[in-house]
Image (cartoon, grey):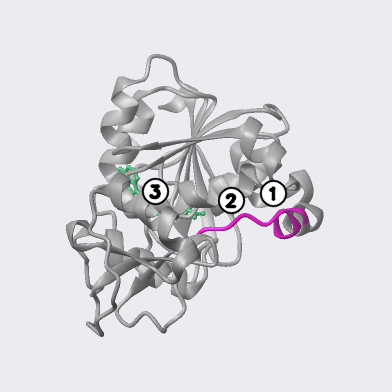
Amino acid sequence: MPIIITEGRISIYPSDESSLEKARYWSARLGAPLVMQLRNEKQNPILVVANNRLEIHLGHSKQKGVFAEFSLTKAHAIQRQEGKNGLLPRAIGLRKHPHATVWDVTAGLGQDGFLLACYGCRVHWVERSRIVAALLEDAVQRGLADRDTQPILQDHVTLDTADAISWMHEQCSPPEVIYLDPMFAKANASALSKKEMQVLRSLVGLDDDAPELLAAALRCHPQRVVVKRPLKAPPLDGRAPSFSLQGTTIRYDIYLAEQM
Ligand SMILES: C[S@@+](CC[C@H](N)C(=O)[O-])C[C@H]1O[C@@H](n2cnc3c(N)ncnc32)[C@H](O)[C@@H]1O
């Protein structure tokens, strides 16, 4: 069982003098205390500002932290390898909707959403964990200062920190696609590394309410709802999709508007 950390216990630590301003900013934004000394407490989460970025550390700060980052090189390599016939573009239906608006309602560290933005989609991220959303927002801010990623982040992505179940309920008109990637019980089938998944799981748990998230997405009636699943897992909430696309470790279940 993963250890779930309560977000209220988070504190912010600037690794050096030059990190102080950013640490103060996040301390105020998250209402979390700024600490100037680290104690060696296992499993106490701490947001460390180091190398001009926000990192989450669980327990001892000498371990490498986890942070969000966008790499155009990595995204282009995936695009070159897969083209528009890749699993994700086909799941989203990019041939029909090359500039689809996608609500990525399980944003996480933004890797899937960033790839979709590189394919030309307009991505709206929704993330309910304030800590994960802070890591994501920090990566967006850094990415906006980078010549390569700036055009994509500026024009193609937006972010809300909210529970997507109620957030979707409040929206007036649906997008073309709603994308769901709730936490898997096993770490080996994700856009994120094993360590990133372990840390994320410790922070947010296993997304046990994913069936409600799917129900809320279907109620919005977009043209399609796409759910990322482990290859052998049953469909989310036992709801048969319109069709599925299988990869080597994951599968996308696609629910089409006419069958919602
Ligand atoms: C497996 S991670 C997503 C990884 C992401 N696809 C990526 O590429 O980085 C799942 C994320 O969804 C978030 N999440 C789960 N249910 C949510 C909900 N109802 N509203 C908003 N965020 C949710 C979790 O907090 C977690 O950060």
Q: Do labels 2 and 1 touch, CB within 8 Å?
A: yes
Q: Tell me if the residue at label 2 has its CB under 8 Å from ligand 1.
A: no
Task: Say whether residue 50 is visible.
Answer: yes
Q: Which label's residue is closer to the chain start, 2 or 3?
A: 3
Q: Where are the magenta residues, as a range?
A: 68-76
Quarter of the figure with residue 213: top left
> Residue tagged by mark 1?
146
Q: Where's residue 12, x and y in %?
A: 31, 62
Q: Front-most of 160 and 215?
A: 160
Alpha carbon of mark 2 to alpha carbon of mark 1: how far? 7 Å
Q: Tell me if the residue at label 1 has its CB under 8 Å from ligand 1.
A: no
Q: Residue at 77% x, 59% y: name it.
A: 77
Within 10 Å of the Cα at label 1, are there few (<14), some (14-19), or many (20+) other Cα atoms? few
> Residue tagged by mark 2?
142
Q: What element carries label 2?
A: helix
Q: What element carries label 3?
A: helix
- In the rendered view, does 102 fall on the left or right side of 204? right
> Residue tagged by mark 3?
133
Quarter of the figure with residue 128: top left
Alpha carbon of mark 2 to alpha carbon of mark 3: how far? 14 Å
Q: Where's residue 176, x and y in %?
A: 54, 25
Q: Residue at 65% x, 51% y: name it.
A: 87
